[in-house]
Image: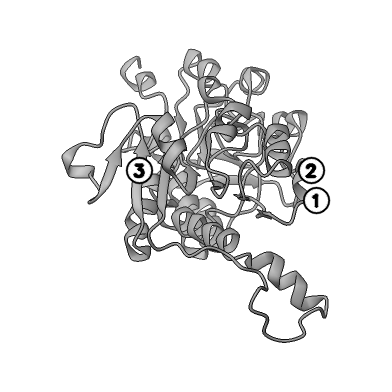
Amino acid sequence: MPQKPRLFLTRRLPREVMEFLNHHFALDFNDQNRVLTKSEIIDAARDCEALLCLLTDTIDAEVIDALPNLRVISNYAVGFDNIDLDAATSRGIPVCNTPEVLTAATADLTWALILAVSRKVVEADRFVRAGCFQGWDPLLFLGRELSGQTLGIVGMGRIGRAVARRAHGFDLRILYTKRTPLAPEESIPGAVHVDMDVLLREADIVSLHLPYSDQVHHLINDQVLAAMKPQAILINTARGALVDEQALVQSLKRSDISGVGLDVYEYEPAVHPGLVDLDSVVLAPHMGSATEQARVRMGLMAAENALAALTGGQVHSVANPQVFSET
């Protein structure tokens, strides 16, 4: 029997994924419920051909250069900004990710945040638990109905389109920004392509669904927040660094916008203390993909990607496909 390739996993994954990994790899993994340091990853993965890591792991040039046998990095995430793509590419190492499998879960969570902020669900929950509910009150926790409002989607990839499709059930007008309009086969009925200025001026809900890059760092800043409607809400289930959190806190205090729902943070797990103090903010712990189905599908795709890259099979998704053409 041929020797199984060695793989290091930086965090335990669901049972079905662990069974797949044990079957196909000589598996080592971090069994502690915490993020490993770079030096711990290097020590544990030094002899491995495959590294299966999470978005919370920093896989930079120092880590990559310290792993002489490394042949593939498989990220348990759609994004891969935790990995030095240039360093991996220069070594001929494919960097794989897991798109599509978490689209529905993240779109659902986006709508959970939209509803929670619009109808003050979390604030009302705290009110009831604190024993403050004394009976029906015509002025108690008045929110806003969604029907007839305008949803502005910034970034119309898979998740953005899934959010837009769900919007039809709430009778919302849909605007979106994207470098180019959607192709006919991807189009969403009623969704209108506009520039950012129009979206900010007209949207009652602004939802972020674009990947992070240096070009969109703090895309949502003082000027952008000031351009939004005073009754508008902001939702971010994409990447924390898209939003200038200090500017967001000040904007909320000035009532430039009315509410925010966040699942991601610039320096997570740290959350800007000003956000924690505001009742108009709903905070989730980066749980966009947190369904049993999505987390298993993510893990299996990440594992299959690693195996395919090592055995010459078909990789589901790779961020630097040029490494295959150069080999």
From mark 1 to mark 3, how far is it between C-alphas? 31 Å
Residue at numbered disc 1: 277
The picture places residue 80, in percent across and down from the top left corner, at 52, 32
Residue at disc 1, secondary structure:
loop
Task: Identify whether 167 is placed above or below 314.
Answer: below
Q: Nearer the viewer, residue 18 or 1?
A: 18
Q: Residues within 10 Å of mark 1 (few under 14, many from 20)?
A: few
Sooner in the amino-acid sequence: mark 1 or mark 3: 3
Q: Amino acid at mark 1?
A: Asp
Task: Identify whether 163 is placed above or below 238.
Answer: below
Q: Residues within 10 Å of mark 3 (few under 14, many from 20)?
A: many
Q: Nearer the viewer, residue 86 or 278?
A: 278
Q: Amino acid at mark 2?
A: Gly
Based on the displayed image, in which of its 4 quarters is residue 181 positioned?
A: top left
The picture places residue 44, in percent across and down from the top left corner, at 71, 35
Residue at disc 3, secondary structure:
strand
Q: Residue at x 55, y 28 (%)?
A: 219
Residue at numbered disc 2: 274
From mark 2 to mark 1, how far is it between C-alphas? 5 Å
Sooner in the amino-acid sequence: mark 3 or mark 2: 3
Left or right of residue 129: residue 11: left
Residue at numbered disc 3: 175
From mark 3 to mark 2, how far is it between C-alphas? 30 Å
Residue located farthest toward the front when viewing the structure as drawn = 138
Residue at disc 2, secondary structure:
helix
Q: Residues within 10 Å of mark 2 (few under 14, many from 20)?
A: some
The picture places residue 38, in percent across and down from the top left corner, at 73, 29
Q: Amino acid at mark 3?
A: Leu
- Is residue 44 something one can see in this rendering? no
The picture places residue 245, in percent across and down from the top left corner, at 69, 36
Q: Are marks 2 and 1 in contact (CB under 8 Å)?
A: yes
